[in-house]
Every structure is written in structure tokens, then in C-alpha cells.
Amino acid sequence: MARAATTVDAFNAVAEPRRRDILDVLAHGELPVNDLVARLGLAQPLVSKHLRVLREVGLVEVRDEGRQRIYRLNGHPLKPIHDWVRAYERTWTERFDRLDAVLEELKDMEEDNGSDD
């Protein structure tokens, strides 16, 4: 079975870790590609390749400022990913609630044992 193209939707685009790194950096503000290269420690052609994919799925927008191309995050295509992950949030919350209960019991037991000394 052939893999879906990375430019089909945001799910495919963010499956690549370096693209997520680019989005993380751009979440703090818009930057020219050279600044992205410096911050990520990646080769410029690689960053440009990933920016092209992110731009094609709408996760980044670009504007020209003089001779520079300035990139910024567009979070709207991330909403379907957020909605999908949110469906699993209840599972995590229930597990953390159970862990909190166990830790509280252990804490109470430790305090009870400490008071006998």
C-alpha cells in the first residue's frame, strides 16, 4: 500500500519530526528562512524543502519583505489534529486520576508509618 503524499493534509505533513520542529519555532513568531536554519541547525535546502510541504498544506504562510521571505505559522490546519487527539484525552485523564489516587494512598501510608516512630 502506497503512503499518502505528505502534501495531502496536516496529519501527513506533521508526521515528519523536523516539520514539527519548524512549527515549534514559528509558534514563537515569524522568521526568515535563514533564522530558521540557524535555530534548527539544519541545512538550508532541507529547511526549504520542509517549508514547501508545510506551505502546501497551509500550515505556514509566507510574505516577502525586501529580499527575504518571512514565514509564519498558520494554526488553522492543526485544528483537525487537535480534535482527533482530544478524543483520546479522556483516556489519559482517567489514567492520571488513577495514578494520583495511588500516589495519595502511598503518601497517606507513609505519613501513617512515620507517625508511629
Image (tube, rainbow, N blue to C red):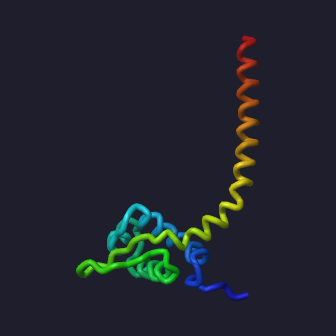
Q: Residue at x 33, y 73 (%)?
A: 32
The residue nearer to you, when weighing 27 against 47, is 27
Quadrant of res 69: bottom left
x, y percentage for residue 31?
34, 69
Q: At 47% from the left edge and 64% from the top edge, which residue is drawn? A: 24
Tell me: 76 left or right of 103: left
Question: Which of the 4 image quarters holds residue 66?
Answer: bottom left
The quadrant the C terminus occupies is: top right
User: Residue 43: where, in percent of width, then height?
Assistant: 40, 76
Task: Decide which of 34, 100 is in the foreground and name it.
Answer: 100
Name the residue at the top extreme: 117
Looking at the picture, does residue 50 appear above or below residue 99? below
Which residue is at a point 41% across and 77% down the rendered structure image?
61
User: Quick check: 21 left or right of 86?
Assistant: left
**Which residue appears at 44% of the width and 63% of the height?**
27
Q: Residue furthest bottom?
A: 2
The answer to whether 30 appears left or right of 1 in the picture is left
Q: Quadrant of the N terminus?
A: bottom right
